Amino acid sequence: MRQLYVNGAWVSSTSGEGVDVINPATEEVIDRVPAGSPADVEPAVAAARAAFPSWARTSPAERGKILAAAAGLLRERAERVARTIATDMGAPYPVALQVQTLMPAGVLATYARLAEEYDFDRGRVGNSLIAREPAGVVAAITPWNYPLHQVICKVAPALAAGCAVVLKPSEVAPLAAYELAEVFHEVGLPPGVFNMVSGRGPVVGEALVAHPDVDMVSFTGSTRAGRQVAALAAETVKRVALELGGKSANVILPDADLATAVKAGVANAFLNSGQTCSAWTRMLVHWDQYDEAVRLAVEAARKYTVGDPFDEDTRLGPLVSAAQRDRVIRYINRGQEEGARLVFGGTDAPLERGYYVAPTIFAGVAPGMTIEQEEIFGPVLSIVPFGSEDEAVQIANGTPYGLAGAVWAGTEERALEVARRLRTGQVAVNGGRFNPLAPFGGYKQSGIGRELGEAGLEEYLETKAIQF
């Protein structure tokens, strides 16, 4: 069984219990990590608390050097890390390499640069000096769907800001976090600045959130779990950053390039087997083009070969676990029960072994249906008709979420006009690419705060006014 990383060393858990790590493509146990306990949280938080003052006083340039070295070493090990991610969470290997490994390595490098370039002293206002200082000890709690990217989106800015961190990675797909811990250890990050305690959310996660010596909690996961985190953190009035669920709309206006918009929309909805919080899971199309859009979506979905993550022909890997597969199947059944029309895929298992769900498309989806309102987190696309631009905006904004979305139109100006009307944290216009330097986060029940870029760094800073 693996160990915990506390105060610069690998140590055994006091619980003596473990959690099996399962390959979702084969259903075989491939590793075992500690099921940590509240007793394991204590020394990890204590180590972070002891390391914080010295790390906070370390020059930003020196912090940046260490992060740059970590980014470089992570890139050197990218193929190994990608194979680890493909094995323990099921992403097809090209996705595991480019999206799940090299992109977060790039994010880590951006925070190395930001640590050196960011102006932590914001100058004077009247007789006051405005300073930005690290928030303190940060508990970072991360999910399984992007098991390295989500870790780096929290740990990198926290370390760049001068905070000390205790990480609790998801116990479902924890192995990429272990790779990162080894990288930090080898580049000489001072002991206690980064600590990692594996285990289950209701045990390790809640102990971290409630701990009086933790100054801030950054959590990514479901909206339901986010509410619990916020409630627990409120007991000690901690700073809280939450990156939660989504039900993002892909709005295709009548003058858009329909074929391009539909193809890109299907790709976005099915990326990572649909296990992406910002996925465009609702495709909104005008009634005049609806039937053609459905036809094009089905045509695109046929190209998403389901299979082993290491097979060159695979475009859709398994879902991460049996529980997640069963959840998605329940939603597919619910969609049919509520009257949506299944036009592709369904609940039949595409392979005999593994937690696979076929790429699935629903037509005839009306606003208010369960599959139109709730986050499914699987390869399920709902195509929703609209009659006017105002109706499209109303439907797009008509869920509790507001994380991401897209608008397609004949001109950038028109798409931008509609994009500004969407109550969501990110909008892609006519296929605009994801930008890891731009703020990422949600409106409404999609969360509080932002990750990535300068905005992500500032989540981990306090503001101090010094009067003269």
Image (cartoon, helix red, strand yellow):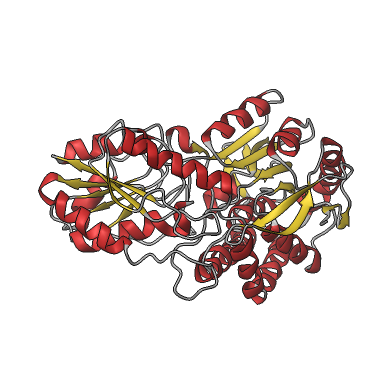
Identify which residue, 55 or 448, lies in the foreground.
448
Residue 430 coordinates in the image, percent (x, y) = 27, 59
Extreme-top residue of the structure:
235
Tally of numbered tags: 0
Extreme-front residue of the structure:
352
Residue 425 coordinates in the image, percent (x, y) = 41, 44
Query: Looking at the image, which residue is at 14% across and 39% down?
Result: 388
Q: Is residue 376 visible from the viewing direction of this image? A: no
Residue 105 coordinates in the image, percent (x, y) = 60, 66
Query: Looking at the image, which residue is at 75% across and 38% down?
Result: 204
Q: Is residue 130 visible from the viewing direction of this image? A: yes
Identify which residue, 445 or 204, lies in the foreground.
204
Tell me where residue 21 sits by quadrant: bottom right
Extreme-left residue of the structure:
288
Identify which residue, 152 or 34, lies in the foreground.
34
* Quarter containing the N terminus: bottom right
Tell me where residue 236 sits by quadrant: top right
Residue 51 coordinates in the image, percent (x, y) = 84, 49
Tell me where residue 212 sits by quadrant: top right
* Quarter containing the C terminus: top right
Instruction: Examine the rendered structure and indicate whether residue 223 appears above or below residue 454.
Output: above
Query: Looking at the image, which residue is at 64% across and 53% down?
Result: 151
Task: Using residue 59 as the reference point, say whether residue 3 is left or right of it.
Answer: right
Task: Using residue 250 as the reference point, say whether residue 58 is left or right of it.
Answer: right
